[in-house]
Image (cartoon, grey):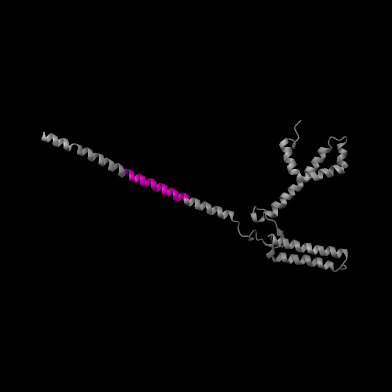
Amino acid sequence: MASLSSISALSPKPKAVTFWSRFSNSCSCSLPQQQQGEDSISSSVKTFSAALALSSLLVSSAAAPPPAVADISGLTPCKESKAFAKREKQSIKKLEASLNKYAPDSAPALAIKASIEKTKRRFENYGKFGLLCGSDGLPHLIVNGDRRHWGEFITPGLLFLYIAGWIGWVGRSYLIATRDDKKPTMKEIIIDVPLANRILWRGFIWPVAAYRELVNGELVAKDV
């Protein structure tokens, strides 16, 4: 009996040892995995932070326009161009030379004086608005998409499209208004001035009128 009791007393100990050994092994195995997961998370955070910093740097550098310097195909700002200043002096000198041929208060002299003032303002505006001049002293338009020179091409281009559209819209409206006349061809040869005058002033809002007709399906003639 003593031997059995001693055996029964000693039998639970290996189970306890086995349980704690398994627990310690599981803890020892889980700790490196947890540490590895934390390392991967921290590395991901660092990578994201670096990417965010790089993207913000690129966006800020792209948003900030470059300084207003002229280094495009050898062009220089007109206000700094010697050839431009020389051309201005020659233009004014030529007008002043022709001014000496007339009396100071005569009509030709007054017209020449006005031309001199216009010439001065034109050259002054060329330099003020940052136009670029070549070796010939003439301003050059930059149409390569540089934001610093959008006003040299985009603004005049939009104005040209508006005027061209206005002329076309007025002519179209006049033809539509006279097509039901008894002799529409004669209305094209001999212009109905009162009708054309009314259509002329309404043509200034041609973009709005064109959009309204597009929505209503009246802009394009239907196929017969």
Residue 198 position within the rendered picture, expressed as x and y whole percent measured from the top left:
83, 43
| In the image, residue 40 lies in the stretch drawn in magenta | yes
In the shown orientation, is residue 161 left or right of residue 183? left
Q: Residue at x 38, y 45 (%)?
A: 37
Report which quarter residue 207 is drawn in.
top right
Residue 71 vertical position relative to residue 183 in the rendered view, above or below: below
The correct choice, above or below, for 155 with respect to 86 in the image is above
Foreground pick, 138 / 175: 175
Q: Quadrant of the N terminus?
A: top left
Asked where in the image residue 199 lies, by quadrant, the reply is top right
- The magenta span reads 29-48
Residue 126 horizontal/vertical position (percent) = 72, 61
Q: Residue furthest top?
A: 224
- Residue at 77 percent across and 46 percent down: it is 204
Name the residue located 71 percent from the left edge and 52 percent from the top edge: 155
Magenta part mainly helix, strand or loop?
helix
Q: Quadrant of residue 211?
A: top right
Q: Is 136 a magenta residue?
A: no
Quadrant (top left, top right, bottom left, bottom right) of the C terminus: top right
Foreground: 31 or 176?
31
x, y percent for residue 220:
74, 36
Query: Front-most of 105 and 73?
Result: 105
Which percent across, then down, holds residue 194? 86, 43
